[in-house]
Image (cartoon, rainbow, N blue to C red):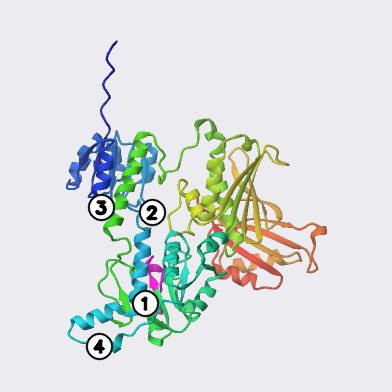
Amino acid sequence: MSAAAPPGPRPRVLVAEKIGDSGIELLREHFEVELGAGWSPDELASRIGEYEGILIRSATKLDGELLERATRLRAIGRAGVGVDNVDVVAATKRGIVVANAPQSNVITAAEHTMALLLALARNIPQAHASLTSGAWERSSFSGIELYEKTLGILGFGRIGQLVAQRALGFGMRVVAYDPYVGAERYRELGVERARSSDEVYAAADFLTLHLPNTPETEGWLDAEALAKCKDGVRILNVARGPLVVDEDLKAALDSGRVGGAALDVFRSEPLTEHPLFAYPNVIVTPHLGASTAEATDRAGYQAAEQVVAALAGGVVTTAVNVPAIPAEDSEVLGPFVPLCRSLGAIAICLAQGSSVDRVQTEFLGRIAERDTRLLAIETLLGVLRGHTEEEVNEVNAPAIADQRGIDVVETKHTGARDYTDLIRVTVTTGEESVRVVGTLIGRRNRPHLLEAWSQRFDVQLEQHLTLFRYRDVPGMIGRVGTIFGQHGVNIVSAAVGREADERKSKDGRLAAMAITTDAAVPREVIEEIVAGEGFVAGRTVTLTP
């Protein structure tokens, strides 16, 4: 009997930056590991071609030029949340899996929020500074209890939910607002679901922000928002600096509308001088939300787990690359990817409820014969992207939806009336459901929107889409065009649809208008039009490729 062939050499993995020992030990169980934390950029460039895997943090820049040298590389693990220092597009083209550790700091961020909450309530930093400077000023630092106070949470993702659980342990009442979380999740956690951010402002004794940083959320907490808050509210921001308008917060502190603030993040960092630093009722920390030994170790271990999965044939749960469509389906399904993403974005734009409870994607026609799971995920991505604290991609979108209590449903029917293929997307928000329908037309697979607000029409989708719902009376289309022209908005295409006679209400028949433009339509233009007589609603959305 012949001897078994010796096992082949184990894959080699480079740990290019310092991570916790637990991550290194995990890698060594599977691979030959080399530590290169002290390497120069030149040394890394000359040797990166030796490794199948690499694990980095934030200092190492893996750009396209460097990845060209990584001829054997199959996996990149980023021990942290973002992947800004990795050229993900170049890695994907080379077949390299890129994975991060998005859940590594959520506990740490939630605990830092609670630390600042307690410090703000009991004036701990101020009392410490006073005592260590030689003064015993016990009466000057009397605080308030958290018990039976109301904590308002704006942004109810993973971190917001962890903060809520901890605040409930202190006997606080918790009110949260996040229209991209299912109503059932609030009930499960014992948290009151606000219908709007205004409800949170009106109720909160303490207000904490856990929103994503997007153009829509920048400057969220401004003078208008602060004016709606209770007198003496205390503000916490352990999320993103741009969420708060610093000048407006300063004015609210001066007026007494805001009783105190605790800030861990700032518009520009690092930062050592700021007008708010001199305020006795403002507590600041230098972006410590993710800074604990456990979070650092957890990030390294989670990134190592992903590298092991990528190189050993396991499931890479936090990959940020677009998963590949099976080769036999790519020609058919590939063009539907941007359509599904666009339909998800349009549906959630029209819904605008106080919660998202269900996202259903229906595939009708020939496409229903294929494996459409990725397309259902693309729909979900269109719904969630830009609305969650976590960065959403095709890999983590289902998990994020599950965390937020959103039911995701995919159905198929091989028949489609009038079209070869149809995709219907329905978003349910409480008692209301909004459906949009689309398809691809022509040899170049142009995406078309066929239905919205229960009105049927046909408009080719472009990057900038605006929809209006209005009473079906003469002159409405002209009024929209006139106001668009006054504001320099150029219309590319337009289509209208209206209700059938049998659906007419006592107020008359309603119609819908879909317009594409060559630039984004300012929100104030939409508001001006909707304020006019006969208009019911207006929405605008910028669709990403």
Q: Nearer the viewer, residue 444 or 98?
A: 98
Which badge, 4 or 2, is on the more N-terminal residue?
A: 2
Q: CA distance from mark 4 to mark 2?
A: 42 Å
Q: Splitting the image into 4 quarters, where does residue 309 fall?
A: top left
The 10 Å Cα crowd at callout 4, few under 14, some 14 to 19, many 20 or more, is: few
The quarter of the rendered structure image containing the N terminus is top left
Q: Which residue is mark 3?
A: 59
Within-10-Å neighbours for mark 1: few <14, some 14–19, many 20+: many
Q: Nearer the viewer, mark 4 or mark 2?
A: 4
Report, in whole angstroms, how far the alpha carbon at label 1 lies from the one at label 2: 27 Å
- Please name whichever residue, 31 or 167, is drawn nearer the observer in this view of the structure: 167
Q: Secondary structure at mark 1?
A: strand
Q: Is residue 291 left or right of residue 412?
A: left
- Region of the chain picked out in magenta, as a range: 236-248
User: Residue 465 lies in what quarter of the image?
Assistant: bottom right
Is residue 266 depicted above or below 338 in this figure? below
Q: Which residue is mark 4?
A: 137
Residue 381, x across and y down, in percent:
51, 51
Nearer the N terminus, badge 3 or badge 1?
3
Tag of residue 261: 1
Whole-number angstrom distance, CA of label 3 to CA of label 2: 20 Å
The residue pinned by badge 2 equals 103
- Tell me the kind of residue under disc 4: Glu
Q: Earlier in the sequence, mark 1 or mark 4?
A: 4
Q: Give amino acid for label 1.
A: Ala
Can see residue 329? yes
